Image (cartoon, rainbow, N blue to C red):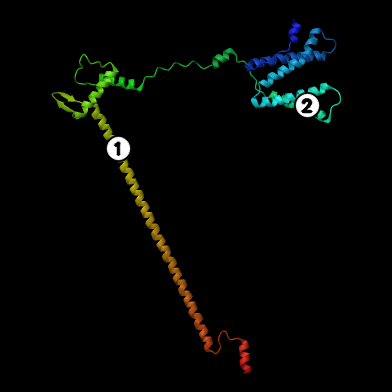
Amino acid sequence: PAASEEAEVPEPLEISDPVEAEKKIKTLKKKLVQIQKLKEKGGGLTEEEAAKVASEPALSNTALELEIGLLEPEAKKHAKVLQRKLQDITKLKNKGGQLSPQEREKVSKGGALQKELDGLLAARPTFREVPTAVAEKVAPSPKKPAPPSIPKKEKAQAKIVQDIKKEDVGDVPDETDNFEVPAEVWKAQKEWEAEGEAEDTGDIEEEGFVTKHSKAAKLNAKKQAAAAVAAEAAAAAEAAAAVEAAAAAERAEKERLEEEERLEAEAAVAAVAAAEAAEEAERTAKGQATIVKGGRAPWHSIEDDEEEELR
C-alpha cells in the first residue's frame, strides 16, 4: 500500500490557494530529487523503487502545471505555449525513425525553449504562509463603532433648548409649556421670531427690567452688517476699476501723442528730401543751359562736328 501511494500520480490542483499550491510544488520536487538519486544509483531496483521511477513524468508534469498556474496572466500564457512546444518535441523524440528536416529543426530548438521556460518559472512570485504570531501582530486592530449620527434638524433643536435654558426669557412658561420637546421649542421659537419683528429691538430699561434684543432683530443686524461689507467690497472693486480705466486712458493718450510725433518726424524728413531733390534738379538744369549757351548742346556728338566741317 505504501508503494502504491508513492507511485500515485496527483491530479493537477485547481489553484485557489497559492500557499497550498506552493507546498504541493515543494513536496513534488522532493520526490523528484529522490527519484533522480535512485536512477543514478544504478543496479537492480526493488518493486517500490521501480514504481517511484515510473511515476517521474507524471510528478514532473504536475509540478510544472502548478508552477505555471502561479505565474502572472501574461507570463502564464507564454509559459503554456512553451510547454506545448516542448511536449511536441518530446513526442517527436519518442516517435523514433527518420525525422524530416522540419522536425529536426524543431527538435534542435528544444534546449532554448526549455531554458526560456525555466527562466519564467524562476522569476515567478513565491507564496509563503505567514506565521500566526506575525499575522496577529500585523493584523489591524478592530475599529471602534462610530457613534450614531444625529440629524441636523435635531441638533439645531437641541441647541435651541440649551440656549433657552441659559438665556433669561422673562416670562415663566405655563405648566402646559413643554420646552423639553424639541418640536415644541422649534414651534415656540418661530412664534417668538414673528413677534420680535414687531417689537422695539433696542435695549430699553423699564422698571428695573431690560428688554433684550429679539432673535429676529439680531438676525436682521447680521444681515445688515453682511450687506454693508458686500457694499464696501463692491465700492472698492468699482474704485479699482475706475483707476484701471483711467490708467488705460492715460496709456492710450500717450501712445497717440507718440504716434503723432513719429508722423511729424517722418513728414519733416520727407520735406527735407524733397527740397534736396528740387535743389539737385535746379543745379542740373542750370548746367545744361550753360553748355547750350557755349555753342554745343550736351547731346551734340563728334559725328555732328565732322559733318559741319565738311559743309
Quadrant of the drawing holding the C terminus: bottom right
**Residue shown at the point (41%, 63%) measured from the top left:** 261
Mark 2–mark 1 distance (CA, rounded to whole Å) = 85 Å
Q: Secondary structure at mark 2?
A: helix
Residue that carries the numbered disc 1 in the rendered image? 229
Outermost residue to the right: 98
**Residue shown at the point (44%, 71%) measured from the top left:** 271
| Picture coordinates of residue 217, whole percent (x, y) | 23, 29
| Picture coordinates of residue 296, whole percent (x, y) | 56, 88
Q: Residues within 10 Å of mark 2 (few under 14, many from 20)?
A: few
| Residue 111: numbered disc | 2
Quadrant of the drawing holding the N terminus: top right
Q: Residues within 10 Å of mark 1 (few under 14, many from 20)?
A: few
**Residue shown at the point (78%, 24%) measured from the top left:** 89
Is residue 220 left or right of 259 when viewed as pictured? left
Outermost residue to the bottom: 311
Outermost residue to the top: 1
The amino acid marked with disc number 2 is Gly
Q: Secondary structure at mark 1?
A: helix
Q: Vertically, is 296 above or below 151?
A: below
Q: Are marks 2 and 1 in contact (CB under 8 Å)?
A: no
| Picture coordinates of residue 146, whole percent (x, y) | 43, 17
**Observer-nearest of 139 and 99:** 99
The amino acid marked with disc number 1 is Val
| Picture coordinates of residue 75, whole percent (x, y) | 67, 26
Is residue 102 left or right of 65 when viewed as pictured? right
Outermost residue to the left: 207
Disc on the earlier residue, 2 or 1:
2
Is residue 7 left or right of 257 when viewed as pictured? right
